[in-house]
């Protein structure tokens, strides 16, 4: 906020003293008081003018490392301020305006500058640390510089209006890996340190058949088998997983449609969604992320592509709820085939909703429901229908619900 009064506390006191001297000089007839009062006015005027004739502030450029910051994570912001000054100036202070989505101490001392009348503008860099608080795109700035004269009588506050957009992404929680449960994971599940991505080409040998090219003869296998063998490529299959994030506004509060960060339950669900996707991709699954009506919320993420997971997390920085309720459209999406793991992330989950999603459990090798606000015995009914169900506490950590499903998978496998 721009301060209209240019004097400091000391300067204001000097002004009151000057006025008092002028009044007393008229009442008492003392010329010395008149001279002293006029001198104080002259000093105050010179102090104010010195601030407006010295420092000139140019453009402000900001950089942030990393370029995006997650909720609960920190980043370093560096503000580069171009300065030109005609005469030497005393030190001052700087302050950068932080939005509500970020916290930090964006203030500090600004150095004194020597005369640079003939030189090019100098750049002063100041850095500070910010922490992401609320998901979304927030704006840093403007930056304010406050300078006082050498006697501390007057101040000048300069605002630079350049602003910088900062993206605060959802919090990604590290989830434990799901144990192998006799094919419940999707069969040929890959590990994170093997051939991740589009799959790996393996060379296998088979007996020679009429018409095979002689260039494809596998001489080592031929010598071992004592018969002519040829090379054949075999493509490994990448297991598929689907994460369903129900964005229907009836599952959340109405505020979830307005802006990120307005509904705590929705924010926890967004964090759970990106965390589950990160876990599945890391474990070797190709992942599709859809709404409950089948609408794709992201491009397919290939197994092991953690760089694409980061882009996906950034895109979810501005995700909000959608109108209406689409849960009844989920079952037809999986009709007609068998799918790998299906993870349904939902807010309010009623017992009646179990009927709508029950068919999906029969088309998935590992159906999971993570609900933020389960009602009644909805989770128990989902378990009876074939789902592995768990509840995520609002403003809580999704790793507990995820781990509980893993423990039950181990128990079912042992049984």
Image (spheres, rainbow, N blue to C red):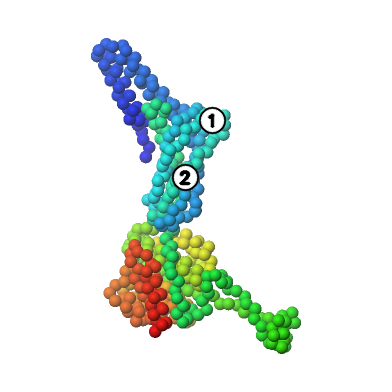
**Alpha carbons under labels 1 and 2: distance apart:** 24 Å
Residue 225 image point, x, y percent? 69, 87
Residue 29 image point, x, y percent? 27, 11
- Within 10 Å of disc 2 (Cα), the crowding (few <14, some 14-19, many 20+) is some
Q: Please tell me whether residue 243 is drawn above or below residue 140 in the rendered image.
A: below
Task: Find numbered disc 1 in the image and state the secondary structure of the residue it sits on.
Answer: loop
Residue 180 image point, x, y percent? 46, 78
Quadrant holding the C terminus? bottom left
Q: Which residue is mark 2?
A: 127
Query: Residue drawn at (74%, 79%), measured in percent from left and top?
Result: 215
Query: Residue drawn at (39%, 71%), measured in percent from left and top?
Result: 402
Asked if one can make out residue 3 in the rendered structure from this viewpoint, the answer is: yes
Q: Nearer the viewer, residue 341 or 328?
A: 341
Work out whether mark 1 precedes mark 2 in sequence or the reverse, and give the earlier one: 1
Q: Which residue is mark 1?
A: 116
Asked if one can make out residue 292 in the rendered structure from this viewpoint, the answer is: no
- Residue 266 figure quarter: bottom left
Query: Residue drawn at (42%, 37%), measured in percent from left and top?
Result: 93
Q: Please tell me whether residue 333 is drawn above or below residue 140 in the rendered image.
A: below
């Amino acid at each position: 906020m721009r301060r209209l009064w240019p004097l400091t506390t000391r300067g204001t006191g000097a002004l009151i003293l000057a006025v008092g001297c002028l009044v007393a000089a008229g009442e008492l007839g003392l010329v010395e008081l008149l001279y002293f009062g006029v001198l104080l006015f002259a000093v105050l005027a010179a102090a104010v003018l010195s601030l407006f004739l010295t420092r000139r502030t140019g453009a402000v450029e900001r950089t942030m490392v990393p370029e995006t910051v997650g909720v609960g994570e920190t980043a370093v912001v560096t503000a580069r301020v171009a300065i030109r000054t005609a005469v030497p100036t005393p030190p001052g202070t700087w302050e950068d305006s932080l939005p509500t989505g970020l916290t930090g101490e964006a203030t500090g001392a600004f150095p004194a500058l020597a005369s640079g009348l003939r030189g090019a503008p100098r750049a002063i860099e100041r850095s500070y640390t910010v922490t992401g608080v609320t998901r979304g795109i927030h704006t840093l700035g403007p930056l304010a510089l406050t300078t006082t004269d050498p006697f501390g009588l007057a101040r000048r506050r300069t605002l630079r209006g350049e602003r910088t957009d900062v993206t605060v992404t959802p919090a990604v929680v590290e989830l434990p890996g799901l144990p192998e449960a006799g094919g419940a994971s999707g069969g040929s599940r890959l590990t994170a340190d093997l051939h991740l991505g589009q799959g790996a080409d393996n060379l296998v040998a088979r007996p020679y058949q009429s018409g095979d090219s002689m260039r494809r003869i596998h001489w080592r296998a031929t010598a071992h088998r004592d018969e002519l063998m040829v090379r054949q490529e075999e493509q490994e299959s990448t297991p598929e997983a689907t994460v369903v994030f129900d964005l229907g506004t009836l599952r959340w509060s109405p505020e979830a449609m307005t802006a990120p960060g307005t509904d705590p339950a929705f924010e926890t669900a967004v964090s759970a969604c990106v965390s589950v996707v990160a876990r599945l991709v890391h474990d070797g699954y190709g992942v599709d992320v859809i709404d409950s009506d089948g609408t794709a919320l992201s491009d397919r993420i290939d197994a092991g592509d953690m760089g694409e997971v980061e882009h996906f997390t950034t895109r979810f920085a501005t995700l909000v709820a959608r109108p209406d309720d689409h849960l009844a459209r989920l079952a037809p999406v999986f009709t007609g085939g068998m799918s790998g793991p299906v993870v349904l992330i939902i807010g309010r989950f009623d017992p009646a909703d179990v009927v709508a999603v029950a068919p999906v459990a029969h088309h998935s090798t590992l159906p999971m429901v993570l609900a933020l606000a389960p009602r009644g015995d909805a989770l128990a009914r989902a378990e009876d229908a074939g789902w592995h169900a768990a509840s995520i506490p609002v403003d809580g950590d999704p790793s507990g619900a995820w781990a509980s499903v893993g423990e039950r998978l181990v128990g079912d496998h042992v049984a």
